[in-house]
Every structure is written in structure tokens, then in C-alpha cells.
Image: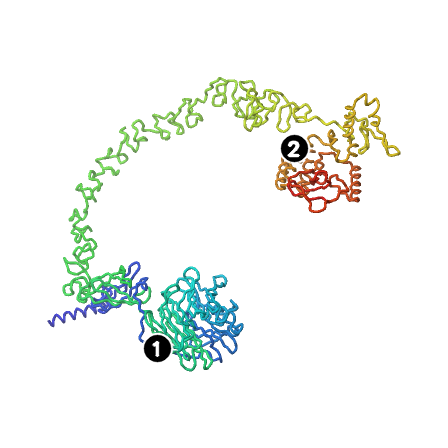
Amino acid sequence: MGQRTLLVTLLLLSAFLLPFMVEDSLENTTSSLDEPAQPAFSSSNYSVSPSEGWTTGGQTLTITGTGFLDMAFKNVTSDGEAYTWTTTTANYVTKSGLSPTVAVDSNGTVHIVHVNWDTDQLWHSTLTGGSWNHDFIANCYGCRHTDMVVDSNDNLHVAYYLKQESTTGYLYYAFYNGTDWTTQSLQNNIQNDQVRIALDANDRPHISYSRSGYLCNGAMLKYHDGSSWATQTLDTSNTYVGCDSSIAIDSQGFVHVTYRNHNNMDQMIVSNVSGQWQKYTVDGGSGVGYYSGMTVDHDDNLHILYRTNSAGGQYKYATGYSGTSWSKTASSGSNTNFRMMTDDLGNIHGSLYDGSNVRHQMMMPGQSWQTSTVDSAGDVGRYNDIFVDHNNMIHIAYYDSTNELLKYANKSTGMYLKKEITVDFGAYGMVTGTVVDDTTIVVETPSAGSVAETVNLSLWGADGTQTDLGLSFLFIAPDDLDMDGFLNPDDDCPNVAGTSTIDRDGCPDTDGDGYSDENDDFPNNPSEWQDTDGDGVGDNSDLFPNDSGEWMDSDGDGAGDNGDAFPYDASETMDSDNDGVGDNADMFPYNSFEYLDSDGDGVGDNSDAFPFDANETMDSDGDGYGDNADVFPNDSSEWLDSDGDGIGDNSDSYPFINNFLDSDGDSIPDLQDAFPNDMTQWMDSDGDGYGDNATGNSPDAFVNLASQWSDVDGDGYGDNWGNASWNDLRSPSSVGEYAEGALMADFCPQVAGNSTAAGFFGCADDDGDGVPNMFEIEDIPLDSDGDGIPDEFDECPDTPLGTLININGCELTINDDGTVDLPEDSFFSGELVQTIGWGAIILTLLTLLQTNAAAAILPDAFRWVQVFRRNTKMTKEEVNELTYLQSLVQAYFQEPENLHDELRALKADLTARFTNNEIKKETREKINVLINDLLTSSDEDLLHIAHSDAYFGLVDTLSPEERTELLNEKVAMGETGATPSAPAADATASSPKGPPTGPSANLNGEINPEDGFEWLEHPAGSGTWYMRQRQGEAWTKWDN
């Protein structure tokens, strides 16, 4: 027994010391009995370190991954320490610390904003590194009710009351960005009462306050919507509502404001939880709602502390949610000025004033309030505020009324959140691990007895769900140091794990064939372990185990692969000519250049130009066509002549047509003959199907014009036409045909002619002006002196312009008495009338009225009698173009943009027609002058021009003497009060009195060509005239 104990002891000792002695020669050796040095094991998402340990258990493992906090069992637990309050004076300046509010940023800096009521100033005190610093914020007359919050960027937001009158003041907001303070007034006319602030998830401030009035006059909310401040009226149901408000915002973003309805003595709350602002009663009818404080916990439950007005002192605690029932508890005492907060662990905290001391209350989830006195030295805490930081440290700022100073107290809550999780080691049981953070778990291994075994690790979360980590842990037994299943005394390699069993036990056997690697000729091949002939091939697979030169016969023909010319072809072993083809299959076994004759023509495929064609063996010109079938065996560019004309198909442009064939015998080969079957025609230059030979069949009269081939009347213009509008003018029996786009079309195809105007070619034009006779306008007789009497009837054709003439065109004589002797004086009496008759006399009078003399003395109302006068100073061409231009202006003068487009188009058309010799240069220039003038005319000018024949020269013009005389008349009429532009009317008529009855806009009047206005006498014969610029407009009365 003693010997076995000694043996085991020696073995254990050697196992402990051996790794240090043979560290460089052995692998996978444990470093100690207490801590096996093994690498960590990891999966894709999780890892464990170390990944192996003793079966005795108690080894610390670290598991890493993600999501561990969500899996953990969480319990708020006391650390068991007894903490006390530490109180200090934060500011020794007299009368500082009134209405203090406190917050702590993420760096642990304590911020207190408070009022010095002696200097009426707002101050900012900070505690950093154990020292207080104090910074001035703003002058602040009568400031009270400060409240502060810190946002996610460590910026400070402060709301407070600034006094205006005894009970009325302003709502102010201050913002600190870490460097500077800014303040702004948000609202006037607020009550000197509690002001509270809260932040939503976007760090936007929301401030509750009450509107000014006796005992408050409305519960109000001021909030920032991301761009500006907005106001929400919460409750104005009576004149005593809104005092002692407090605010909280839950995790869903809903806002809750609690306050007192003094009229009913109720504790109220208002919220937008329903989607709109609604009021709810928290506690009713018992004189409640004083000094309220409110906070919201992690489950969105609201907690409110408030005081009642009952005799003897009483305060209440209520918990619930807006729109649901509330649980309320009453406690005796004189506690007031409640401030509340929820810490990171979900504990509810409150600071309060009990009448002389500042006190702290804390309630853990599911438990009751725990109360402690913070400071009792004098009258302290009348004004107080509380904040709990992320390290569960409580901070209270309060006012020392006895010494009139700012004081500060802090204390740890002694609470922490215990996070644990169950780690499953399979058959060896479950143990509790500690969740350090979301990525780390620390756990100790359980005892596994004495059997070495690998187990899979998994976790059990608080929700009862198992999570497989994909990790394994190896338990190591001390009596089998290399853990290979062979106990140390029986293991031929006790310090190196192995599985060999044939030649040695427990030694490395890489290929698992039972032979240890040391004695295995093939340690990595489980099917081999011996090589008798030493050729590197194991005996098990060597077909020639005693022949070091052979070991394989791939094709099974009995010849080793090394000596077999075709080791993978059982039908071949020899290749006498070394051409790579076995003698058995080689048709030329002793000719290394040949071995196959595919077409059986006796010529080996390598020498045969056509190895698969028994009819061909040679290709002299190398064109790929055998000499036997090649029509051109020595010309590599040709091998076929399909049309037998001696020219190879490749060079023959027409390989299937004899190049020398002439079907119609006109000496022109068919390939070059446009009419191969008509010996009278062979060319067609314009490709219209009609031959160029004028003496041949169907000759082309226009050899270079594809749209024309016939000219019946021989005038040089083709019988075909391209203008579709001519189709109705041609009868089926007429010559020519419609050909789209046809040029040189003859408008008179069966009558020779020389006309060229406007596309009307080939018609008779006797005067040679390009216009066909059929379109000619009778010439206007020549009147050299412009007196209106044609030269052929004018006895005095050279009468000076403006001369008063008689019917024969000669000058009239003016008597001394101013009368004129007219031959016509005797014309209407005596035998003359009886001889020639009244018809001749009337004709003579009409002729006289056409003269310039008559034009000079006729009033405008009788100019119509000159119907037979003609202006002979313009050509017919000019009259036509001017008439069209006037029509264009009359059609578009009310649409200037369209008019300008039409004028520009006309200008381009004139140029084209002038280029084609369709109009004269003088005509084009004259019309262009008017077009340029019209393009720059105003809308008002266009209105006058459109209705003025005189502008376009389509009525007689006045001589200089006539214009002077007319001007004198207008001046004279102006001096007497007449209006020249008005139509003739009774000069003595006056405007009617009283409200006028104007004509309808639908009535039409007459256009006065001199002023361009439209005039209307209404009612007819009344002497009352109306005018307007355009038809359709309202009439305007003319006051003469």
C-alpha cells in the first residue's frame, strides 16, 4: 500500500516537473496541476478562456460575447454598508442659496443654480475636484422657483420665475452650453408659484407653470418644438386652478403635469396620453395638492408627493398613471416643498422640508418609504432640490434659513444592481455566474469527479430561455496526465496523448491505424504502415511489393506501369516507332510519321491533304480544294467557274451570268445595259425607267430629272406635277401624272408657254412679266400728272399737282369775285340736256368726282363717291402685297406676339419670292419698311394702324397743300371747341344730365381712320357719341 502511494506521488511530482525539463521537445504538456495552460476556445459569437481545467472544479472562466445584460437575472441589492450624510456650505456669500436647484453631469461635476436675494442675482455654483466655483448668470429681480435639468450633451436647462409685481411676473429660461449662459423671457403674467422643467427624448425642454391670478388662474405648459417655443393651455376651468404644478415625461414621450384645483381642493393631472390634452383627478375633495413633486419610474408609473391642508399636518403619496386609477397613502407630518427623482435602479427619491429640517425619502420597487434626516442644524431645507447620479450618489442642495447660506449634502444609496446568470456544464451541473457587463461573464467550474470529459456550455437567462454558446470545456483527470485514456502506469507515452495499441500503448498515432507514429513507415496514412521493397509505396497497395522498380499496374495488363509504354491502356504495351501509338493500333508501326489512314486511300493522314476524302490527296495551290476537283488547280484564288465564262467565281462580279452576253444585240453587254431587252435604249441617267436616247423607245425628255420624263407641249416644263392641289385640275385623259416632289411642273402641259411666277410654269405670258395671262389684272391707265384723269382723256396731262382742274383735266379760272367759271354751268340747261340726256350728265359728274380737285373739296362723309378713282402711283403687285399685310395686322393686332411671328414669316417669304424672281426688288423693300415699323409699334399704335387704309397707302393721299389746309381747319375747329377726331355731330349738342344710359358692349360702331377709335351715336340721332379702342370693350361717353 505504501509503495503504491509512493508511486502515485512520484508520478504526480514528475508530471508537475516534466514540462519544465522537456518544454522544447514535448507538445500539449500541462504547465501545473492547478492551472492547465490551454488556449481559449471560441465560436463565431462567443469565446471561453481557459477552455480546459481540472475535474476537481473551482477554476475561474471568462465567457465573452454579446447580449448578456438582457439575459441576466437583475436584483437591486444593498451593498451592506452604512452610509451617512455629508453636509457642507457650498457658498458663504450672505443670503445666497435661495430657491436652489441641483444636477450632476456625466463627468461627475455638481451644478447648483440659486438666487442671492440680497443682490437679486442668479448664480451658478459648481463642485469639481472637491472645490466650489461660483459664476454670475444674470440680474434677477425677485427671482424664485428655479428648476434645472441636464441633457444628454451635458448642457444645463433652467426655468425660473422673475418678479414683475407682488404676485405676478415673467417665466424665464436659461441655457448653459458648458461655457456660456444665455437667458430669455418666455412668458409674462405668470403666478409667483412653482415652476418645473423636464426634457423629452430629443432634449427639448417642457416647462409647467401657472397663469397669474388669485390662487392661480390656469395650468399652463411652455415647450420647445425644435424650432421655437410654443404655449399649451392645460386647464382654465376656474379662477383658482394651476398652483403647485410639477411635470414628468414618460418613456413614450407623453407629458404629465400635476397641479391643484383650489376651487374643488383636488389634486389634478393633465396629459396628452390619449392623443389630446385631457384632465384627470388624482385625489379629490380633501384639501389636497399643495407643494407637489412628481417623478416617473422605469415602468412609466407616476409617483406624486403632496401636502393637504388638514389640521395637525398631513401629506400624501399617490402612484398611478394618467387616465387610470391611483393608489394613495396618507401620512401625518408637516412635510412640504417636495422634490422627486427616479434613479438608474428604479428607486424613487424625494427631498422635503419638515418645518425645520431637510429630509430624504427613498422607496425601492415594491417596498415602502425609508426616511432619513439630512441636516437639522438650525432651520434648513425650506428651499431644496434633489438629484441622483449614475453612480447612485444622492445630491441635495438646500437653503440654510438660519445662516442665510447655500448648503449641499450627499450620500451613497448603498444600492447596486446585481446581475447574474446560470451557466450549464452539461452532466456536471449548473452554476451561477456574474454578468460583469453586456459582453463579459465570470464563473467558477463545478467539480466533475475523476473522469476526463469534454462538455458543451450553455446559458439560462432570466426569461427561462437556454442559449447554446457553441463552446466546449475539457475536464482533465490528474491520474491520466495526457488525458488519452491510458492511465499513467500503463501509458508507453505518459506525457504525450496517443491512441496507438499495436506496437505501443498510448503513444501518438496520427493516422489512427494502431501503429505509433515512431514505428509507422506511413504515419499519416491509416491504410499503410510497412514498405518491404523500400520503394515508398506501402505493401498493402504495392502490386509488386518485392520489386522496388514497380508497384502499380493501372491497366491490369500484367506489365508494371513504369515499364508499360501505355500504363492506362490494357490493349497496348509497346510502341516500336515511338510515335505515341501502340503497335497493336498503329497502321504504320515502323513509320514514326504515320499511324492512321482514315479514308483508306493508302496515304497516311499526316501526308494526305484530305485525310477523310478518298478522292483527294493533293492541293497544289493550297486553296483547300483538291486538285481533282479544282477548276483552277494552280490558282489559289480560284477554284470554281459557275457560269463557264472562263472567269473564276471569286473575281467574277456576276458569277452566275456570262459576262459577254448581249441579249438585245445593241453591242452593250447585258451587265451594262439599263434596257437589256430593248436595243434602242441602254442608259437611264436619272433612274426613272425612261431611256436617255431621244430617238429610242419611250425617250426621257428630262434625262437628269427623275420626276419628269415627258414634255408634250415642248416648252421645257414637265407634264408631271408634285402639287397635290392640282389633282382636281387634271382630268384622267390629261397628260402627265402626280409624282410627289416633282420639279419643273408644267401648269399648262398641253400649251407651250413661258410663265414663271409663283410656281405656275409653262403657261402663256404675253407681257413677259412671269404671270400667266390667265392671272393678269387689267392694267391701270397712266395718269402722268396725278389729277385722276387718264392721259388718254386728259387734255392737259402736265397740270401741276394740287391745281384746281375741270373735267377735261385743265386748270380752272378763278374770277375776281372768287367764283369759278365752269363749263358745267351751262351743262345742265338748254338744248344740251335735251340732246345728251341725264344719264350722260350723271356719268360726267361721277367722272369729275374721281379727280384730285374733287378729292380736295369733298368732305369725308362724301368721299365714297370716288368709288371709281384708282391710285395709279403703286403697281398691282404692291397693292396686292399691301392688302395682304393690312389683313395680317387686322387679324393679329390684339395678339402682338403672334403678329410678330407672322410678320417675320412674311419677311422671309418676301425674300424667297424675290430670290425666285416672283416679286420686284422695289416691292420687297417697300413691304419690309412697313414690316420693320410694325415690329416696333406699340399696342396702341397697332390699334390705329389696323383700321387705317391710309397707313397702307390703300386710299388717296393728300398733297402738301391739302395737308396744310386740313391742319388749318383742325386748328380753327380746336379754337371753337370742336374735336377733330370725333365723327360729325351737332356742335351745339351738350352732354345729357343725370346718370347716363350707355350702349351695350355688343353694339358695333364705325372706325374713324384718322384716329383709329370706334365711334357710336347712341341713341341714333341723339347727338350723344361714345368711343372705345377695341371691339368688345365697354363704351366710353365722349363729352364735346
Q: Quadrant of residue 449?
A: bottom left
Q: Secondary structure at mark 2?
A: helix
Q: Which residue does the image show at 55% across and 23% down from the upper left? A: 737
- The correct choice, above or below, for 415 with respect to 584 in the image is below
Residue located beneath label 2 in the image: 914
- The circle on residue 228 is none
Q: Nearer the viewer, residue 999 or 595?
A: 999
Q: Nearer the viewer, residue 713 or 1030?
A: 1030
Q: Position of residue 308 (x, y in %)?
A: 41, 73
Q: Residues within 10 Å of mark 2 (few under 14, many from 20)?
A: some
Give the residue at mark 1.
Answer: 83
Q: Secondary structure at mark 1?
A: loop
Residue closest to the eye, 919 or 688 = 919
Q: Quadrant of the C terminus?
A: top right
Picture coordinates of residue 575 (x, y %)?
A: 23, 38
Residue 879, by quadrant, is top right
- The colour scheme applied to this rendered structure is rainbow
Amino acid type, mark 1 = Tyr
What's the residue type where badge 2 is placed? Phe
Q: Is residue 171 above or below residue 670?
A: below
